[in-house]
Image (cartoon, helix red, strand yellow):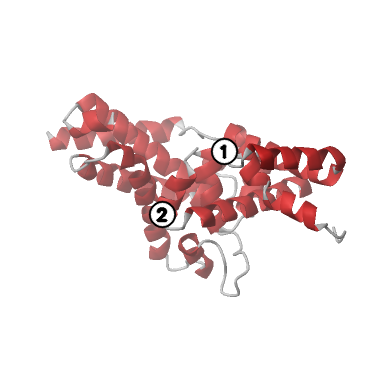
Amino acid sequence: MTQAVSPECRAILAGISAYLDGELETSACDAIERHCETCPSCARAVDGLRETIGLCRGAARVPIPADTRDKARARIRALLKAGK
Amino acid sequence: MVRQAATGNTVAMERLLGRAQEVAYRFSLLVCGHPEDAEDVMQDALLNTYRHVSTIKDPGAFRTWLYQTVRNACLMKRRRRVDEPAHLASLEQGGVDRDGAPASMDVADSSRSADQRLIDAVMGERLRRALATLSPGHRVIVVLRDMEGLSTREVATITGLSEANVKQRLHRARLTLRASLEAS
């Protein structure tokens, strides 16, 4: 982990999120992809972050447990009834 | 749905209130990490949404308003606790402690509650644990952006940060999350 990071790699690493979020211009995307073809370390970092974001997106929408959901529905109905 | 609810459509209102409670539940669990607070935060979200709907002028802004409301409810809930860890303020400040270093996690070491088992079943214990290693300020950004799917602009509005700051923090948070996942 103490390995020196070149300025080019540092720039690539700083831009990975923007790259993966589709926020970079095509030319900047091309530069990252070209760099990763010859730099296994940066390529691993890009893949790792891509996987991490994928894990988060896949974990989205944690459902409410059935009993909590039932209580929530009951609260809503009581509120709407009282509000009428 | 927001517009319909605002004009008195009961079915739309019921759906909207259900959505508000889901958001409150997930936020309580994933960001605040205190399942025991979820019910109260859900109740706050319910009442606030019910009161707010009739005043909505821009339905497009409802989502941001809802997350802000839920976030504030979580903060208030935590502040009311006498034994509140000091670093919880970092949920507001963006996740750095007094020395400017990333604040430590505030997620209670909840002893595998039913809610946590549910989260583990859905997202996996590995990811939950990794998420818990993030500072509260970073965790809120990852949850809102990568899990809830909000835009950078929406996250900026909710957290009160600039868009550039949100992007910067999101990147750091993802790197930390990645490191935790690799270490686990």
Distance (Cα) linking label 2 and label 1:
19 Å
Q: Residue at x 27, y 42 (%)?
A: B49
Asked whether, in this view, residue B94 is left or right of residue A49, the answer is: left
Q: Residue at x 21, y 41 (%)?
A: B57
Asked whether, in this view, residue B2 is left or right of residue B76, the answer is: left
Above or below, comparing residue B14 to residue B165 in the picture? above
Percent x, y of residue B167: 56, 51
Asked whether, in this view, residue B144 is left or right of residue B174, the answer is: left
Q: Residue at x 50, y 33 (%)?
A: A61
Instruction: Tell me if I can see residue B9 in this picture.
Output: yes
Q: Which element is circle 1 on?
A: helix
Which chain letter goes with mark 2?
B
Which quarter of the picture shows residue A33? top right
Q: Quadrant of the N terminus of chain A?
A: bottom right
Count of residue discs = 2
Residue annotated with mark 1: B119
Q: Quadrant of the C terminus of chain A?
A: top left
- Residue B74, numbered circle: 2
- Residue A61, numbered circle: none
Q: Which element is circle 2 on?
A: helix
State which tag comes first along the sequence, 2 or 1.
2
Which chain letter goes with mark 1?
B
Disc 1 marks a residue whose amino acid type is Ile
Q: Nearer the viewer, residue B174 or B114?
A: B174
Percent x, y of residue A69: 39, 32
Whether pointer 2 and pointer 1 mark residues with C-beta atoms closer than 8 Å, the reply is no
Residue that sits furthest to the front in the current view? A27
Which quarter of the picture shows residue B72? bottom left
- Label 2 and label 1 in one chain: yes
Disc 2 marks a residue whose amino acid type is Cys
Q: Residue at x 19, y 26 (%)?
A: B9
